[in-house]
Image: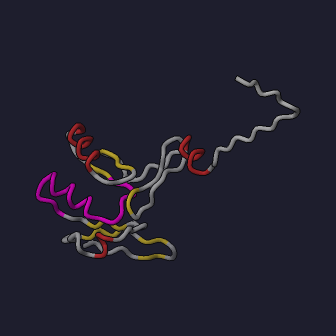
Amino acid sequence: MLNGDVKDLVMEPVVLTAVTNEMPIAKNEIFGPVAPIIKARDVDHAIQIANDSLNGLSGSIFTEDRHLGSEVAKKIETGMIHVNDQSVNDESHIPFGGEKESGIGRFNGEWAIEKFTTVKWIGIQNGYRDFPIF
């Protein structure tokens, strides 16, 4: 484990090793420079570990095989997942949001219009309207 010092309002990164999925550090969303490392036996076990969480905001897969990374990404229950990139990319034209207890729904881009507005049609007839009788 590497200990991160705190200087004023800045916390240096912390890397935690020998973490299991049962530990609070693995079960809770951490919004800080903390990297808990959980070893997986193989790809299927890694997917199981990732999905054995109440949270699902974002994730990353690092691999030399981008096709495999894409296939694994499809199986992980997150709102966003990136192959060979950082776990969070917030771009205004791409939907941002999570799954499970990390929230359901998306914002940014055209998805924001759908999520934050209600479409309503109000029609007003300005005079008498003669309805045809069949």
* Residue furthest front as drawn: 134
* Residue furthest left as drawn: 41
Q: Position of residue 111 (x, y in %)?
A: 53, 44
Relative to 3, 88 lies left or right: right
**54 or 58: nearer the viewer:** 54
Residue shown at the point (53%, 50%) measured from the top left: 107
Residue shown at the point (34%, 47%) measured from the top left: 82
Residue shown at the point (30%, 76%) measured from the top left: 24
| 45 in relation to 121, above or below | below
Q: Position of residue 55 (x, y in %)?
A: 36, 63
Relative to 82, 1 lies left or right: left
Q: How is the image coloured?
A: secondary structure
Residue shown at the point (48%, 53%) measured from the top left: 105
* Residue 52 on the magenta segment: yes
**65 or 1: nearer the viewer:** 65
The range drawn in magenta is 39-59
| 107 in relation to 134, above or below | below
When asked about the image quadrant of residue 130, the answer is top right
Q: Quarter of the image for the N terminus: give it.
A: bottom left
Relative to 92, 77 lies left or right: left
* Residue 126 on the magenta segment: no
